[in-house]
Amino acid sequence: MSKETKIEDIVSLAKRRGFIFAGSDVYGGISGFYDYGPLGVALKRNITNLWWHMFVESRDDMFGIDAAIIMNPKVWQASGHVDTFTDPLAECGECKGRFRADKIDTSKCPNCGKEGTFSEPRQFNMMFKTNVGPVDDESSVSYLRPETAQGIFTNYKNVVDTLYPDLPFGLAQIGKAFRNEISPRDFIFRVRELEQMEIEYFVNPKDWEVEFEKWRLAVHEWLKALGLKPENVHELEVGDGDRAHYSKRTIDFEYDFPIGREELLGLAYRTDFDLMNIKNNAGKSMEYTVKGSTERFVPHVIEPSFGVERALMAVLSEAYTEDEVNGEKRIYLKLPEHLAPVKYCVSPLLKNKPELVAKAREVYKALQEKYGAVMWDDNGNIGKRYRRQDEIGTPYCVVIDFDTLEDDTVTVRNRDTTEQTRINISELA
RNA sequence: GCGAGUGUGGUAUAACGUUUAUUACUCCUGCCUUCCAAGCAGGCAACGCGGGUUAGACUCCCGCCACUCGCACCA
């Protein structure tokens, strides 16, 4: 990321090149929702796929899950979300302070001391409400999940009953969550519909510190794989007063976004809080019996929680680069190859030479079959195509020229260095 | 949700109470082009939405929506 990169530059590029659009754009947009265009989907998928590969497919102790977005409302009562988020808040007309109407004497403002200035209490709940089934009353109310974690906890027993994995083991999930934020801000940083990649890692309580440390290191590996420079990543040890009540240790991983240093992901030790909240029909907690022993306990949980949009925004911020070539401004996305939405762009050097076009088509087809994410471009001149590909972060441009017809070699132009090398078609990859 | 500000093609912008709303880049078509946004010809494309004032509103007024910045919120 260039020092002076502004969020507007990224927003503008994201729209111009088909990465990210305002939600419902043609109708004037809707606050807190964004849509992904062709390039954005590709980039986002590359990120989530990388995560899934890294934390699920390549490990023996991790299992995937995909729970429904709408759950039994009891889930949100047990987790505390219903109570926590239905606070009636009243506002003082004098100092604009907001207070729990059920916790204070609303005849006098505890902040400025004015009397009789409070508004009627209003409900502020971050959960999106909906009704399940044809009846539209209190009995049918449920919520769009405000986090994916509960979908994992509620399936803990199902997984243990079916696979009975050794501890420690983890369940991973990628999915949407919804929060009715009062004021969504900063592009895709704070949104009302978001995607999370979450892991609940179940451990023997005596091992939590060791496992927590392993996860701390694993998180850094992940951030490295995203191409984020270590100097832009910061660990914030969340202090006693600031942690959620159930957490004994939390590290916020922050990133130097163009909007400032903000939270990118969280790593929390949640003790046995979540599993203790869930009881089976006999009122029993989710106990785990260590195989071949009589040791029984409710596992403790370490939760690495990743926001997809924030990862995406960090990747874009890190990759956005402006420099000068021949006195002209060049904008390019220095994306890691494995994240780039398009891996190769194939062009004939000249569009009006049928033999070049035919040969280029051949190469294009071959690469597309092998990699999928390949683009064809024969518009304008070659320099223009390079710049176009630069803006979407395509690492390599392959050009077919007259020599290709003779000896099957092509020019491969590197996005970051703009250097060109001549290689045989068979060596492409 | 509160306060302040801002809304013109995809992006960035100009002007104006009254002809067909300016310009650049992008984009599309054709010509040309033997490696970094060249050139020529043509083309698509905008006054956020609704109401009011007016003979006439992109321009003035009101409401809504969206965005930006503060506050608050971020369990």
Image (tube, grey):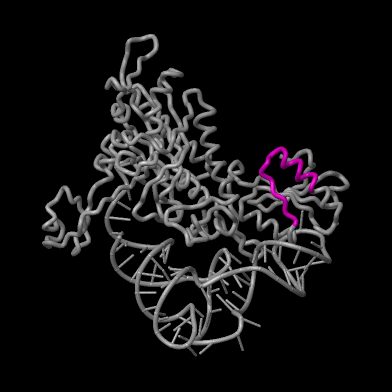
Residue visible at 83% across and 49% down in the picture = A358
Q: Residue at x 52, y 57 (%)?
A: A10
Position of A87 with respect to A336 (left or right) is left
Which residue is at the far front?
Answer: A134
Q: Is residue A146 visible?
A: no
Q: Is A119 left or right of B18, judged from the image as shown?
A: left
Q: Which residues are magenta?
A: A361-378
- A370, above or below A309, in the image: above
Please identify the quadrant where the C terminus of chain A is shown: top right
Q: Main secondary structure of the magenta part?
A: helix
Q: Nearer the viewer, residue A240 or A203?
A: A203
* Res A381 visible: yes
Q: Can you name the residue that lies furthest to the right here? A: A406
Residue A202 drawn above or below residue A427: above
Residue A11, how many percent across, how many down?
51, 58
**Which of the 4 image quarters holds residue A290?**
top left
> Residue B25 at x, y = what percent?
64, 68
Residue A177 against residue B4 in the figure, above or below? above
Q: Is residue A326 above or below residue A265?
A: below
Comparing A110 with A314, the one in front is A110
Q: State the image coordinates of residue A366 (x, y, percent, origin top left).
A: 76, 41
Counting the numbered discs, the total is 0
Q: Residue A427: where, in percent of width, then height?
A: 76, 39
**Magenta stretch: includes residue A365:** yes
Q: Residue at x 59, y 50 (%)?
A: A39
A425 within the magenta span: no
In the image, B44 versus A142, the foreground residue is A142
Residue at (48% x, 62% y) in the render = A28
On screen, residue A311 versus residue A416, left or right, reads left
